[in-house]
Image (spheres, rainbow, N blue to C red):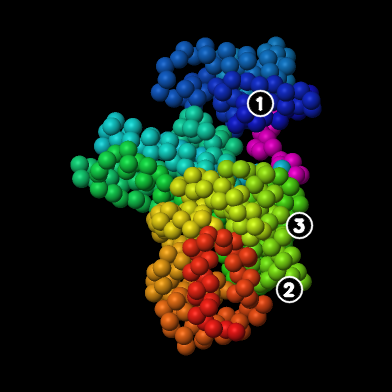
Amino acid sequence: MKKWAFTPSENRLETGNEIATVTGKASSVLKYLLENEGRVVSRDEILKAIWRDVHVTPDIVREYIFDLRQALGDSASNPRYIETVRGKGFRLLGGVEVQRRKPDLPNAMRRARIAVLRPLCLEGGERWQRFADGMADELITDLARFSDLAVVARVSSFGADTSKSILDVVEQLDCDYVLESSLSAWPDGLKAQFQLIDGRDGLHAWADTIERPIGSMPQLSGEIALSVANQLGGMSGAIIRSEQRYAVRRPMSALTAYENYVMACQLEERYDQASMRKGLAHAERAIEIDPEFARGHLVRAFFCERGEAVSSERTRDEWIAETQASAERAMTIDTRDPLILSICARSFASTGRVAEARNAVIRAADFAQNESQAALETASALTLVAGEYDLADHLLETAFALCPMPPAYYAFAKGRNLLFSGRYQEAEAVAETGPDYESTYVIGCLAQSLQNKAAEARRTHEILMSKYPHFSFARYPETFGIVAETTLDTYRDAVARLALD
């Protein structure tokens, strides 16, 4: 007797080189028989389980049993897989096992997969159910913009049988996470609740409640969807954090490309040398496993950009070259990722390719409106490469609005734009609360210098050089790709006032 592997999410049976596909309903019938293997299941029981609240004749069960037998090469007179017990029902004898998920290919990068289930409208009636459905549609679109996530299509996720357990839904949709939501609406306001559930254990990985006064419904829908998407997606989002909890327990040699990437994302937010070295190693392992993983090359570029803090085994010029190589490799793979475009813009600028740098940053600004970190990185590039301070301000406002509790490094982009757009006192204040890293002291020192706070600026410069002895004001514009003339003029003025010679 052949042994069949059954993949419910794909309505597919496999044995050796033979593949048989069945309809969705036939797949549901087979799955139910598998759940009750060895037990006689009546037609009424199958009808109740599969066709709940739908009026069909009992004979329909026999038709789908016939379809399954055809696919399995079985017969009613001499059953090997499905037996008919006269007057009682049907019994699965064996020979079929569920293939819960096809294993990843050795060099494949499987991103975390999320399904947004159809929202449940608790109060407000049909009008607000339509609103909730539209909000979920927008959320699916917003999540799909994160290149390190895979999002299940609406037609599949909205059609999931939510009367079953979450683990069954996860299996049906072949996803890692499901997002459940509910909406309650009253004349003066609404409350939307969201729960992200991890498909590995059925436990909550994240939850949030958003309450809003009722205003313009389309605008309100988009605002809520965008807020939730940015809490879930991105290099600091809830899904990456959840993935990290699993990846950190496994040896590096056992991690997939995606798991190495999520570990690199976690370590990239730290600024100690040990974390940066380990993060660079994870990034390099990710692209070793999957050379076509654009985000792997991107996160490697982030570490190389801070290369001298990672290791002194390479010179600053060598780290700049490594940053450029990783950024450009990422862009050849994905030309629409705003994070990749923004770091490419600074990399192009640092090597004198000014026109390419400006083109890249303008393209990044087109794509960066819906993702907080992309907006932040693009704002930095607009400040340094294009001198577009107002547009950078807009993207910074977007970044902070979409990420109400931003990581510490958000201070760099904000501080730079304040500094180079002439708001020196505000730039100094941001630097005082920034993380203990090179750019924090540079921004603070230059802001103090431009306010003619000579003594304070010199003290900050002394701290900067004690922590980062290889730092050079002469090389800083090249490292960060400062090519906008107005930005360079402000930078040179600040350094001249320090009177370091």
Q: CA distance from mark 1 to mark 3?
A: 33 Å
How many marks the image carries: the answer is: 3
Q: Which mark is residue 96?
A: none
Of 500 and 330, nearer the camera is 500
Q: Which residues are magenta?
A: 95-107
First in residue order: circle 2 vs circle 3: 3
Q: CA distance from mark 2 to mark 3?
A: 26 Å
What SS does tag 3 mark? helix
- Which amino acid lies under the numbered mark 2 shown in the image of this protein? Ser
The mark that comes first in sequence, 1 or 3, is 1
> Gap between marks 1 and 2, in whole Å?
54 Å
Q: Contact, CB < 8 Å: mark 1 with mark 2?
A: no
Image quarter in which the N terminus is found:
top right
> Amino acid type of disc 3?
Ser
Disc 2 designates what residue? 312
Q: Nearer the viewer, mark 1 or mark 2?
A: 2
Which residue lies at the image location 50% right of the left edge and 80% below the top edge? 497
Mark closer to the observer (2, 3): 2
Residue 120 in the figure: left or right of residue 11: left
Q: Can you identify the residue that label 3 sits on? A: 253
Residue ID for mark 1:
12
Above or below 392: residue 418: below
**Residue 339 in the image, given as x and y percentages of width and height:** 56, 52
Going by the picture, which residue comes out furthest to the left?
187
Q: Is residue 328 left or right of residue 147?
A: right
Frontmost residue, 485 versus 160 = 485
Q: Image height check: is 407 above or below 210?
A: below
314 falls in the magenta region: no
Q: Secondary structure at mark 2?
A: loop
Earlier sequence position, callout 1 versus callout 2: 1
